[in-house]
Amino acid sequence: MRIMGIDPGSNYMGLGCVELKGSSLTCIGHTVVHVSAGAENWPQRLKAIFEAVNAHIEVWKPMAVSAEEVFFAKNPQSALKLGQARGAALAAVARLDIPIHEYSASTVKQTLTGSGRAEKEQVERMVKLFLGASLAAHGPVARFDASDALAIAICHAQQNKIQSLGKPQAQNIREKISRL
């Protein structure tokens, strides 16, 4: 199963794709979509996000997409723009009827590190541990946006594995993950 993760952003949007085969995870690719704040008007920026997500769907061919849920921000204008950028990305996915799964930032952090309050550096280290050499083959992760997108995809892969298991076995895996 190929899973594309989306870390929404109105200036920088992280995209990452992993493949789950049995219990093995492989990095398919990662990137950061940079939509310049001053170069284009807002509708054109949303179009650029839509097109970038669509282009990576065509290359990576994911069977599922996971995205970070919207969080509440202190600045309403920033929250609105983030929501619109996220909507543009998810519209590119939805038009192809690819299943979309949403996770809170704390769920992603909990799944990867065992702590819902983990720092970005800790999440990035766990992404590198989960993906190993397959991540290195795609070049360095230049920004946290890309490692966060991969973390969101890994989170869905882990949640998917847990849900497919019996409850006692799933609880055992959750306990192991929390000890990492």
Image (cartoon, helix red, strand yellow):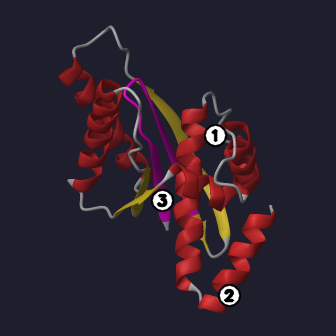
Residue located beneath label 2 in the image: 169
Residue at the limit of the structure toward the top, as seen here: 38
Question: Residue shown at 77%/72% (left/top)?
Answer: 176
> In the rendered view of the protein, which quadrant contains the C terminus?
bottom right
Element carrying mark 3: strand
Q: Give the range drawn in magenta.
A: 2-19
Q: Are marks 1 and 3 in contact (CB under 8 Å)?
A: no
The amino acid at mark 1 is His
Up-down: is 62 above or below 162? above
Q: Name the residue beneath numbered marker 1.
A: 138
Q: Is mark 2 on a helix, strand or loop?
A: helix
Q: What residue type is labelled 3?
A: Ile
Query: Which disc number belongs to residue 3?
Result: 3
What residue lies at 48% left-to-right and 54% top-to-bottom? Answer: 104
**In the picture shown, does residue 40 fall above or below 117?**
above
- The local crowd at label 3, few if under 14, some if 14 to 19, many if 20 or more residues have their Cα within 10 Å, is many
The foreground one among 100 and 62 is 100
Q: Which of marks 1 and 3 is nearer the N terminus?
A: 3
Q: Earlier in the sequence, mark 2 or mark 1?
A: 1
- Please give the label number shown on residue 69: none
- Of the residues tagged 2 and 1, which is closer to the observer? 2
> Looking at the magenta stretch, what is its main secondary structure?
strand
Circle 1 packing at 10 Å, graded few (<14), some (14-19), many (20+), is few
Q: Quadrant of residue 33?
A: top left
In three-dimensional space, the C-alpha distance between marks 2 and 3, rounded to whole angstroms, equals 23 Å
Label 1 to label 3, Cα distance in Å? 16 Å
